[in-house]
Image: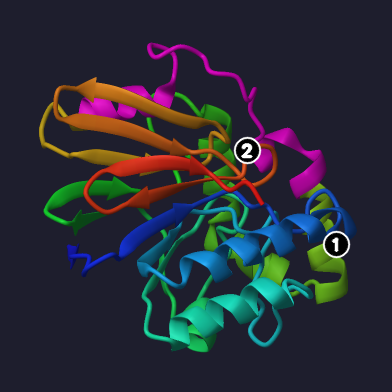
Amino acid sequence: MIKINTTKNKKVYFASDQHLGAPTPEKSFPREKKFVAWLNLIKEDAEAIFLVGDLFDFWFEYDTVVPKGFVRVLGKLAEIRDSGIPIYFFVGNHDLWMNDYFEKELNITVYHKPQIFIINNKKVFIGHGDGLGPEDKGFKRMKKVFTFPLFKWMFKWLHPDLGVKLGQFMSVKNKMISGDEDFKFLGEEKEWLVQYCKRKLETNHYDYFVFGHRHLPLEIQLNENSKYINLGDWINYFTYGEFSNEFKLLKYQK
C-alpha cells in the first residue's frame, strides 16, 4: 500500500479512457494534442498522476515492437516522469496486453489489478473498473480468452503489421471486445460498479473509489464517509480528477 502526502500547493491528478488511436489515428490526433496540453498544465503542481486505463484504444507489446504512433503523449509522460513526478498506470480492457514497456522505457509503474493508496490520509481504491461487480459478464468471458497464455503466445507470432491492424479493427468494431456499453447512467441500483463498491464497504472502509471504464463522469455518495468517482473520458467529456484535501471531478476546457 503506497502512501502519498501532497506538499504545499501540490495536487494528485487522475484521468482515464483517452482511447488514443480510435476510431483512426488521424481522428484521434486532436484528442492526443489536447491530452498532452493537459499534462503540460498539471505537471506544474502535480504530486503524482494516475492514468486509470484505456490510454490507448489498442495496445500490444511484442518482444521488440510496440504499436506505431502516440509519440507526443509518450514523450510528455517521459518528460514528466524524468522530472521526478510519479506516474501510476492501470491497465484497462483496451490496453490489457501491456507488459513492461512503460516500466522499462518510461519508469512508470503499471498495475493489472485495482490497488489501494493512502492519499493525504484518505483510503482510495483505484482501478480501471472492467470485469468488476455482478455484471460486465461479456467482458469477463472475453478477458479470460485474451489473457490466456496460449492465445497471447499465438497472437504474438502474427507479424506486427497484421497483428496491430487486426487488433485495432476488433477494438473499434467489436463491441464485446471493446467493452463498449450504453454510455447512459443506469441509476444507482443498476450501476454495477456502484454495487461493487457497496459490497466492498461491507467488509472494509474506503474514503473514495476511483474508476474509469464507464466513460461517464460520476460522483455518487455511497454512505456518509465514502464516495464513488467515475472519471469520464477524453472522447466526449474531457474530465479528470483532482485531489488535495478533497476529490474534485473537473472538466478540461481548453
100 left or right, relative to 183? left
Of the two numbered discs 2 and 1 in the rendering, the one whose residue sits closer to the viewer: 2
The numbered mark at residue 237 is 2
Instruction: Examine the structure image and report whether residue 238 is included in the region drawn in magenta.
Output: no
* Marks 2 and 1, how far apart at CA: 27 Å
Tell me the amino acid under the disc marked 1: Lys
Counting every numbered tag in the picture gives 2
Q: Which residue is mark 1?
A: 165
161 left or right, relative to 155? right
Between discs 2 and 1, the one toward the N terminus = 1
Residue at image coords 69%, 58%: 34
Residue at image coords 63%, 38%: 237
Question: Is residue 100 visible from the viewing direction of this image?
Answer: no
Instruction: Examine the structure image and report whether residue 182 is included in the region drawn in magenta.
Output: yes
Q: x, y percentage for residue 15? A: 50, 52
Q: Which residues are magenta?
A: 171-199
Compared with residue 89, is residue 103 higher up or lower down, i.e. above or below?
below
Residue at image coords 44%, 77%: 108
Give the SS element for disc 1: helix
Here the colouring is: rainbow
Location of the N terminus by quadrant is bottom left
